[in-house]
Image: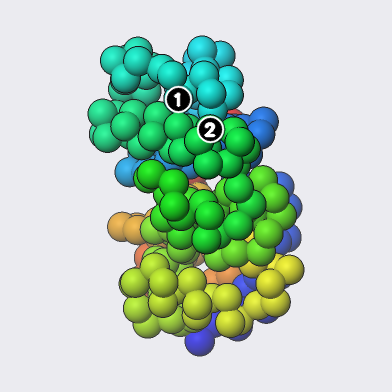
Amino acid sequence: MGQPEAINEALAGQYPQARAELDFRSPFELLIATVLSAQSTDRRVNSVTPELFRRYPTPLDLAGAEASDVEAIIQPVGFYRNKTTAIIGLSRRLVDQFDGAVPATLDELVTLPGVGRKTANVVLGNAFGVPGITPDTHLIRLANRFGWVDNTKPDTVERAVGALFPPSEWVMVCHRVIWHGRRCCHARRPACGACVIYDLCPSRDIGEQDRVKAAALIREPRA
């Protein structure tokens, strides 16, 4: 197993600015953006949310929206019809059951349309400071490569990674690992030769070993 504390420390040094890469100004905006991000990229979601939140700044506004108008705004993120149904539906639920406020507990968040544990943990950790593990595709891939878990089921990965770190570190561990997955430890061709945790990683032989070629594989999702 890759040394969890040492890997986390190295990634903290490499990505001191690690954070959620969805743009948001409130728990409601983060909740909606996270639902939209399913099977899409944060950059694409960030390209549509300014107009969406300009038109519908509150749950009450979005709850009363015409589906066709919302679909026209969020179409670039993909699966826009299902996502429109979800974000209008969860906005109505917020208005009807939570007085228009985003709840700050996991049990309540997962009752909202389109919201599972992953989305709930993103909102709790980044909007409310509640510790949680977000088992997105990058965390699942890297946790397996690091030897922290030998399983791809989100719930299993969530429990396994959570057991390796104190709750106070959970949110930032996820940010750092996700940033590393997006920038360096790619699914198809990891940039192993240019990886800051090369000496700590049990999977360091699976990717590009040449330092120069590996460095060329590093990419920044956002400017």
* Mark 1 to mark 2 CA distance (whole Å): 8 Å
- Return the disc, 1 or 2, that comes first in the chain's sequence: 1
Residue toward you, 117 or 66: 66
Look at the picture and state if 150 lies above or below 110. Answer: below
Q: Residue drawn at (47%, 32%), measured in percent from left and top? A: 91
Residue type beneath disc 2: Val
Is disc 1 surrounded by few (<14), some (14 to 19) or many (20+) residues within 10 Å?
many
* SS for callout 1: helix
What residue is disc 2 on? 95
Residue 11: where, in percent of width, then height? Answer: 65, 63
Residue 3: where, in percent of width, then height? Answer: 60, 83
Q: Residue drawn at (48%, 71%), measured in percent from left and top? A: 158
Q: Image quadrant for the C terminus?
A: top right
What residue is disc 1 on? 63
Residue type beneath disc 1: Ala
* SS for callout 2: helix
Look at the picture and state if 181 lies above or below 218. Answer: below
Q: Residue drawn at (66%, 64%), measured in percent from left and top? A: 131
Q: Is residue 72 left or right of residue 190?
A: left
Asked whether residue 194 is in view, the answer is no
Residue toward you, 57 or 11: 57
Asked whether residue 70 is in view, the answer is yes
In the rendered view, how is the structure colored?
Answer: rainbow
Residue 60: where, in percent of width, then height? Answer: 53, 23
Residue toward you, 107 or 3: 107
Q: Is residue 152 left or right of residue 222?
A: left
Q: Which mark is residue 217?
A: none
